[in-house]
Image (cartoon, rainbow, N blue to C red):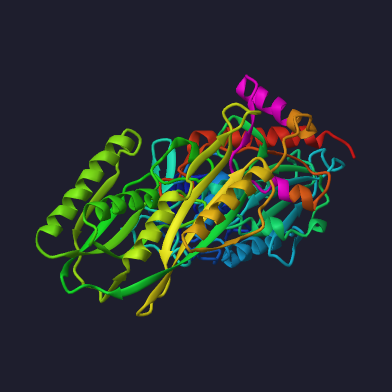
């Protein structure tokens, strides 16, 4: 439990108070001229929790110590404490992509309270600066970078508003996760580490720091694309946004989206159809569309199209009312729902048998990995007046089953690296009228090679055209070309070697990092990326390995101490 003082006799000794509070007196209470002066710090209270210290200030006051309690935080006692405290702060502040105003206000208050200079550009990115200290005052400036937004995914049975509600943290063994939602460790842990660095004492050996907090990374790297490079003077960058502890990343894939729109014609449901059914697919792992794409996890969009095609083939007069699957462009689709109108009588039983048969096939194919996969159909309570025409539902299912998903090519240059992939991310209906509804299908393509990525995006556009869909494709963001001769890479390798007792793995990653874009905005930037172990990113299974956060912090300090020794 966390102990909160509500009333205090001024004659009690601070060591005795410390024993009552089970915490150090340092930074919590100061005794001055026979008066107790409360100084509440994060060692005493966590952000977002309400506590009031009603202390008698009269020098002659006396009375008992009254202590109330509140539930212990999931990060209570974890090390490094400052990093975990700041991470908990972030989990209590809503920060969906494109809606980062609350966390920006938090950062502004943080900087103001510590009298640290900060600047923002017109895009919304923010830089907080800390002078060098502990002998690093004259060293070149180092940029610490992370993004402040998070992917907002939740399980269907969870009630959570990402624009209003704080996350509920759960500690399970050596892992920290959120209850039924994404955790936001991507990239909240990196942001928390930057805040902890900014808050270090003046005795700490650090070079001058520019902590760059970018916005809207998760929905298109908007912050990095819009970055005003003049915000930064540093030319050495530590990006804290990768998720495999013990590895240093020096390159990443580029990426670009394709948004397809397919007009779907509607017509009245035949009078012979009076058995509405709902097909559900759930329990899939989902995950990051770059990091997890090579694992061949089930994709709810792909599986829903496959099951529906089997149903329509077995019973051609089945009519599709609606189909929804997937959500975020950078997440592998986990859930799908389709509503069907089925003829009365034996057709209902046949459709249920067809779905059950496909469920068995898919569990046989995916079940060793996707242990919680669930595919089922049940009676839907409401009839719909309209359904897709046979021609339109054929076009929709053909489009979904033809679009590529998964690894398209492995790299010949870097063994084990996915070179090019596509994520068939989502299919959603728009607002329908009596005769038509437009379905939006989202694809996210990644590649280490720009021309290879554009070949696949052209392929997607061609498939869309054959099925009668239009396509809009944004400007692709660039990859980050590896530089094995990077000076900061050598410093980072030495620090990892000292901490781990072995040479770290140096690699490129099949995911989007902001390093390449920032490098274009700030010529001459020398960068590496690393982080603690995070699994299940971009899904409600997201979790951070607690045991890797302390060494992640320690290696960051070692790198910065080494950089503090360098001179301009």
Q: Is residue 267 above or below residue 208?
A: below
Depth order, front residue of 374/387? 387
Q: Is residue 167 above or below residue 414?
A: below
- Magenta region: 492-517
Residue 235 visible, this angle: yes
Which quarter of the picture shows residue 437?
bottom left
> Is residue 512 part of the magenta span, yes or no?
yes
Which quarter of the picture shows residue 36?
bottom right
The x, y position of residue 152, in whole percent, is 47, 57
Q: Residue at x 87, y 42 (%)?
A: 138
Furthest-top residue in this view: 502
Furthest-right residue in this view: 568
Q: Quadrant of the C terminus?
A: top right
Q: In this view, does 534 lie to the left or right of 527?
A: left
Furthest-bottom residue in this view: 434
Depth order, front residue of 215/281? 281
Depth order, front residue of 360/213? 360
Q: In this view, does 232 lie to the left or right of 554?
A: right
Q: Is residue 506 above or below residue 478?
A: above
The x, y position of residue 547, in whole percent, is 50, 33
The x, y position of residue 518, in whole percent, is 74, 50
> Is residue 365 part of the magenta span, yes or no?
no
Q: In this view, does 349 lie to the left or right of 53?
A: left
Furthest-left residue in this view: 345
The x, y position of residue 54, in whole percent, is 48, 66
Q: Which residue is drawn at 41% across and 75% down?
A: 431
Depth order, front residue of 403/257? 403
Q: Residue at x 61, y 23 (%)?
A: 500
Residue 254 visible, this angle: no
């Amino acid at each position: 439990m966390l102990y909160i003082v509500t009333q205090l006799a001024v004659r009690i000794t601070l060591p005795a108070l410390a024993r009552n509070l089970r915490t150090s007196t340092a930074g919590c209470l100061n005794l001055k001229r026979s008066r107790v002066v409360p100084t509440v710090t994060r060692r005493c209270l966590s952000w977002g929790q309400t506590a009031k210290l009603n202390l008698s200030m009269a020098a002659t006051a006396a009375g008992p110590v009254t202590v109330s309690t509140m539930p212990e935080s999931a990060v209570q006692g974890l090390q490094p404490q400052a990093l975990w405290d700041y991470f908990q702060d972030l989990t209590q502040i809503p920060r969906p992509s494109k809606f980062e105003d609350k966390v920006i206000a938090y950062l502004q208050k943080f900087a103001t309270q510590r009298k640290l200079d900060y600047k923002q550009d017109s895009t919304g990115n923010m830089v907080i600066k800390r002078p060098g200290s502990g002998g690093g005052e004259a060293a070149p400036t180092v940029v610490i970078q992370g993004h402040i937004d998070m992917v907002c995914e939740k399980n269907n049975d969870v009630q959570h508003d990402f624009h209003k509600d704080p996350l509920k943290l759960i500690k399970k063994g050596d892992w920290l996760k959120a209850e039924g939602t994404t955790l936001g460790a991507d990239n909240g842990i990196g942001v928390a580490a930057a805040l902890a660095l900014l808050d270090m004492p003046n005795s700490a050996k650090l070079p001058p720091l520019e902590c760059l907090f970018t916005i809207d990374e998760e929905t298109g790297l908007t912050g990095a694309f819009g970055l005003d490079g003049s915000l930064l003077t540093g030319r050495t960058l530590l990006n804290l946004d990768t998720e495999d502890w013990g590895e240093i990343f020096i390159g990443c894939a580029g990426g670009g989206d394709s948004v397809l729109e397919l007009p779907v014609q509607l017509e009245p449901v035949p009078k012979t159809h009076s058995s509405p059914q709902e097909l559900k697919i759930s329990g899939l792992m989902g995950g990051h569309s770059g990091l997890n794409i090579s694992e061949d996890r089930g994709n709810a969009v792909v599986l829903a199209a496959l099951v529906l095609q089997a149903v329509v083939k077995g019973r051609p007069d089945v009519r599709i009312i609606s189909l929804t699957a997937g959500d975020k462009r950078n997440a592998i689709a986990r859930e799908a729902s389709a509503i069907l109108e089925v003829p009365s009588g034996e057709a209902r039983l046949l459709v249920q048998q067809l779905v059950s048969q496909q469920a068995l096939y898919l569990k046989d194919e995916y079940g060793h990995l996707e242990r919680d996969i669930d595919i089922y159909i049940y009676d839907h309570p409401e009839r719909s007046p309209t359904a897709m025409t046979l021609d339109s539902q054929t076009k929709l299912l053909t489009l979904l089953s033809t679009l590529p998903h998964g690894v398209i090519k492995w790299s010949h240059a870097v063994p084990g690296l996915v070179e090019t992939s596509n994520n068939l991310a989502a299919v959603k209906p728009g607002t329908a009228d009596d005769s038509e509804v437009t379905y939006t299908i989202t694809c996210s393509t990644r590649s280490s090679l720009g021309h290879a990525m554009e070949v696949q995006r052209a392929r997607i556009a061609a498939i869309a055209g054959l099925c009668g869909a239009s396509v809009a494709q944004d400007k692709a963001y660039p990859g980050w070309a590896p530089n094995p001769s990077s000076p900061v890479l050598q410093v980072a390798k030495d620090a990892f070697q000292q901490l781990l007792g072995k040479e770290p793995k140096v690699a490129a990653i099949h995911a989007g990092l902001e390093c390449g874009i920032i490098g274009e905005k700030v010529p001459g930037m020398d960068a590496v990326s690393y982080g603690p172990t995070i699994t299940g990113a971009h899904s409600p299974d997201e979790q951070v390995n607690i045991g890797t956060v302390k060494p992640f912090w320690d290696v960051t300090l070692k790198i910065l101490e080494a950089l503090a020794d360098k001179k301009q």
